[in-house]
Amino acid sequence: MKSGTSWESKYAYARAKQIGPLIEVAGTTASDTNGPLFPGDHKQQTKYILDKMEAALHELGASKHDVIRTRMYVTDASIADEVASIHGVFFAGIDPASTLLVVKSLLDPSMLVEIEMSAYK
């Protein structure tokens, strides 16, 4: 399933892919067909990303309750706790296995957060 961002067609990948009961949702940033959203606002970016990923899961007949693993990438260690806290509220009671990494940068400097997830439906 594709969400229409320019990166999907440019780099030949899907937003989410299902094979049997396994669903992989590609690394997702706060962006749409016009480019990055909420430049410099890691809280809004994180919320947008999680909602966008949940929509991708729904399109494949799954929900956030099927998520078994997440990986969060942030470009600044000082925002890690807030990003992880938003993740914690979103996944409260689900508690997927999770990794949070600090990376040097993402494709666009205004993007501060990228998240990927795996689900089993």
Image (spheres, rainbow, N blue to C red):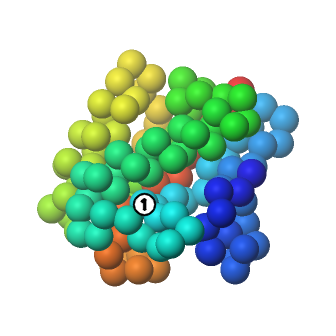
Q: Is residue 78 left or right of residue 86?
A: left
- The C terminus is located in which quarter? top right
> Which residue is at the front of the view, 112 or 36?
36
Picture coordinates of residue 55, whole percent (x, y): 58, 40
Is residue 102 in view? no
Extreme residue in the right direction: 20
Q: Is residue 100 left or right of residue 51?
A: left
**Residue at 39% over, 19% down:** 93
Q: How many tags in the picture?
A: 1
Residue assigned mark 1: 30
Q: Residue at x 71, y 57 (%)?
A: 2
Q: Secondary structure at mark 1?
A: loop
Q: Position of residue 23 (x, y in %)?
A: 70, 41
Please give the name of the residue rendered at 44% of the width and 51% of the height, measured from the top-left corner.
49
Using the rendered view, name the quadrant where residue 105 is placed: bottom left
The location of residue 119, given as percent across then percent down, is: 63, 36
Instruction: Give percent across and percent down for residue 70.
Output: 49, 44
Q: Which residue is most to the left?
A: 78
Q: Dot 1, crowdedness within 10 Å: few (<14), some or many (≥20)?
A: many
Residue situated in front as seen by the camera: 34 or 89: 34
Q: Residue at the location (42% across, 70% down)? A: 36
Amino acid type of the residue that numbered disc 1 sits on in the rendered structure:
Ala
88 w.r.t. 114: above or below: above
Against 107, residue 42 (above or below) is above
- Whether residue 92 is visible here, answered yes or no, is yes
Furthest toward the top, the residue is 93
